[in-house]
Amino acid sequence: MKPFDLVQGTLDLLILKSLALEPLHGWAIARRIRQLSSDVLLVQQGSLYPALQRLEHQGWIRGKWGVSEQNRRARYYALTKAGQKQLEKETALWERLAAAVTQVVRTVS
Amino acid sequence: MRWIDALRLRVRALVRGGAVDAELQDEIQSHLQQMIEENVAAGMSPADARTAALREFGGVQQVLEESRDARGVAWIGNLLQDIRYGARLMMRAPGFAAAAILTVALGIGATTAMFSVVYGVLLQPLPFGDPDRLVNVWTTAFTRGLPRAYVGMANVYDWRARNHVFEDIAALRPIANFNLTGPGGDPERLNGARVEAKLFPVLRVSPMLGRGFSEEEDEIGHENVAILSYGLWKRRFGGDPAVVGRSILLSGTPHTVVGVMGPAFAYPTRDYEIWTPLTFDPQELVNRQNYSYLAIARLKPAVTVEQAGAEMNMISAQLEREHPKENIGIGSDVAPMHADTVATVRTPLYVLLGAVSAMLLIGCANLANLLLARALVRQRELAVRAALGAGQARLVMQSIAELVPMLIAGGVLALVIAAAAIDALVPLLPSDVPRAENIGLQFPVMGFATATLALIAVLVGAWPALNASRSGLSACATDLSRSVTGGLRRTRTRDLLVVAQIAATLWLAIGAMLLTRSFAQLKRVNPGFESARVYSLHLAIPRAKYRTDRDVAEFCRRVLERVQAVPEVVAAGMVNRLPLGGGAQTANLEFEGVDSKLSSSGIGPQADLRSVTPDYFRTLRIPLISGRVFTEADAQDSPPIGIVDERVAKTILRGTDPIGRRFRVPVPDAPWITIVGVVGHIRHDRLDDDGRPQVYWPYKQRAQDRMALVVQTRNDAETIGPTLAAVIRSVDPEQPVYDARSLDAVVDRSLAQRWLQTALLASFAAVALLLASIGVYGVIAYAVGQRRREFGIRLALGASRREIVALVMRRGTTLFAAGAAIGLVAAGVMGRLLATLLYNITSSDVVSFGSATLVLLLVTLAACGLPARRAARVDPSIALRAE
């Protein structure tokens, strides 16, 4: 099956979720999302960085330069307290939405 | 406090956008590197790995761009970019930019400067408490030819007792000369006023330091106290607060300083520097003579000026019945103080304001015209941008942003022009312009003028962008084939603008011409005396020191003796009132054998009274017509004699030989004065005002304590001032001199107000002419550019080059004719307003109208000439190939 393009608006949730455990740099975020979704969700790099900029400006994540496992300079993004709250909010929202959509789809007409 | 972080990031993104981009680029590079490494690990060759990574990642620039938008400051970046683009456009078309910036700068600058003057003098409230409740009360004596005169104390006391309309009335004697001597500087003469204690409460002002006067200080014997002006306090006493309570010497008499006024206080005018209590001879309340006081009153709440006037008329009528002898023909006039203060300058200032508005209008038209021309050039560019997907808002925004550098440059220049103009203007203002001390740059006006021009710029600037995005790509296409109708409509707009500009310019030019011609007429007036090589200065001779008339005359004689001994001096004399120096001394005279009942007032004709030394006439070269001038032998104990001017001889003595006839001041026991000579009449009050008949006394027989020294020099009058001051100080080291200047300068100063309004209007007209020529040139040059192909065809078909020139010129003259017709009508209307400012020419003066029209026609033709020549030089083959 071909990987899905992300539904508009879910990218933010996925980024926040992928950062919930530990700070990651851009490439690692994309990889984490891909891994966690078992290669189903593929983040377009073209939308990843604008999204990171937007989230940083919302104050949900904060970027800091660090050194990656390959000893390369990389910008690590970490979840802020506000980002934590946002993640909870968006997770709840998503669960309600997903449940609702599932319910609609499964309904036998 | 998340918003603080957000703000920090946003500001960083805005001011350090480059750094943020660079950082992001680093980040993306590192991302790519990891992808490449991953690919290599999966077994690709390094080159393939790199290509695959790049492909997968997509456009780096696009990511950067979208990230920038995500930062939420994109529009500001765009704006700055557009402004920078506008600045670059400006650099590329310096001629256009200069014209536009100059238009903006002159339009805003001149309007602001002139309006600031008008506001300072006319509109700003007076610096008193509740100034609109203040009125001046004047005496009227129409039967004596005095529609407005100073008031007498007896009347003031009666008015005060009987009126129900004023909270109070205060009187002051506005002429009081003090010689200030003592430490702190040279002796100097101060302009002061003697005021009733009530004055400060009536004006609702109180001193900044110390106190005002008390009622007891209005009593004779308690009046030796003084209040200083802020300027005097700073200048002479170094701003020392301890001056209050100190004693100063005024004309030899010690006065205690009781107060210092604040810097804003200027009453009666800014020339006054010291105030002392008003005392007067109690006899004045009985004989009801001596009308030498100003009266100012404060209206009771809810009383109008008209009601006050009506009650005062009633009281005046009562007084006339009660004192038929003294008060006959004496009425009163109540006038708002503010209107009175500015009465003489109101019309000229409004005329100038009108001129300045016309200039702002011309500036707007010019700016609109310039921007339209530019818009037409850029129409295609805009259409292409619209076709490539630029949104309407973005295009409009861009068009406006591009104007910002021009408006800023123009605005800054305007600020400089306005400030410089006000700085240059205020010292030029004649000293009798009231309230000149209030003039300062008025930023609200500047804001208004700027907003007007900016609005014009925005409307005109945004319009093509609106148009372009509406018509989209089709406009781009039609532009190639030059849509005729659209072009025509736009051309009409520009034509109309030029017509309006020509009309307004002609209006201004005619006004300027009228004033200039009037001024030239005035300069040609023969004043009856010669001012060339004459120097003048004033002396206030203190009575405290020179107690008797004999002492005063002796002082004058000794000064003259020493002045005449100076080698440079040809002749020297003294007079108590300098011609054209402001101020006159007048009285009704009784001539022996002339029935005073014949004159309308029944109390004899009014004449100028003057005390002079023998050489006065020779110094000013006033011709002796018959008889003799005075000599030093005409002294206190010799028979009283006088000299009259030719006007007395002609109008009062009606051609009979004046020598040997007698006149006197019509008071009981006044001696009869025998006429020994007749001299020429001189212009005394103003060059344009013929004035009253003039009568002279020998200075020894009628000594005056305020004298002007006039000195005719061999070469240049300007340099003798210090010598004269030294001579006077050698006679009396405590004697100050004041108002020292050449008589030419005195004459010029009497014309200063007219000179100023003429010069201002003329310079406005010159600028307007310049702007109009730019406007006409722009329109014609554009039209020629548009019709190049047509001209080429015409030439190819056999039209001569002269015919082409004529074609272009005809367009120019048509525009001119339309504009001139409107301008002439407007000028005709304006002429009536100007009539009061004109001397010896009518407001419909043919020469002024004709010459202004001719000048404008020549300017128009010159502005058309250049494009016309270009049109005639069109090479038919190139023009046909052009499109």
Image (spheres, rainbow, N blue to C red):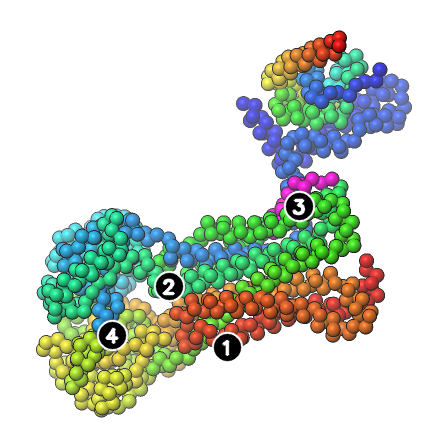
Place of residue B790 in the rendered image (x, y in percent of width and height, measured from the top left):
77, 64
**In terms of depth relative to the viewer, which is nearer, B266 or B153?**
B153
Of the two numbered discs 4 and 3 in the rendering, the one whose residue sits closer to the viewer: 3
Which sits earlier in the primary sequence, circle 4 or circle 1?
4
Q: How would you rate the neighbour count of disc 4 (Cα within 10 Å): few for under 14, some for 14-19, many for 20 or more?
A: many
Q: Compare marks 1 and 3 and give the one earlier in the sequence.
A: 3
- In terms of image quadrants, where is residue B158? bottom left
Mark 4 or 3, nearer chain start: 3
- Chain under label 2? B
Q: Which mark is residue B466?
A: 3
Report, in whole angstroms, how far the alpha carbon at label 2 lies from the one at label 3.
48 Å
Which quadrant is the C terminus of chain B positioned in?
bottom right
User: Mark 4 or mark 2: which is in front?
Assistant: 2
Estimate the spatial distance between the alpha carbons at disc 1 and disc 3, rounded to whole Å. 49 Å
* Tag 2 residue: B345
Against B157, is A82 above or below?
above
Q: Hey, what amino acid is under mark 1?
A: Val
Mark 4 or mark 2: name the one nearer the start of the chain.
2
Q: Which residue is mark 4?
A: B576
Q: Amino acid at mark 4?
A: Asn
Task: Name the residue carrying label 1.
Answer: B847
Q: Judge from the rendering whether residue B704 lies leftward or rightward of residue B876; answer left or right.
A: left
Q: Nearer the viewer, mark 2 or mark 3?
A: 3
Q: Say whether mark 3 and mark 1 are on the same chain.
A: yes
Q: Amino acid at mark 3?
A: Leu
Q: Disc 1 versus disc 2: distance between alpha carbons?
A: 27 Å
| Residue contact between numbered discs 1 and 3, judged by CB atoms under 8 Å | no
Q: Nearer the viewer, residue B394 or B260?
A: B394
Q: CA distance from mark 4 to mark 3?
A: 74 Å
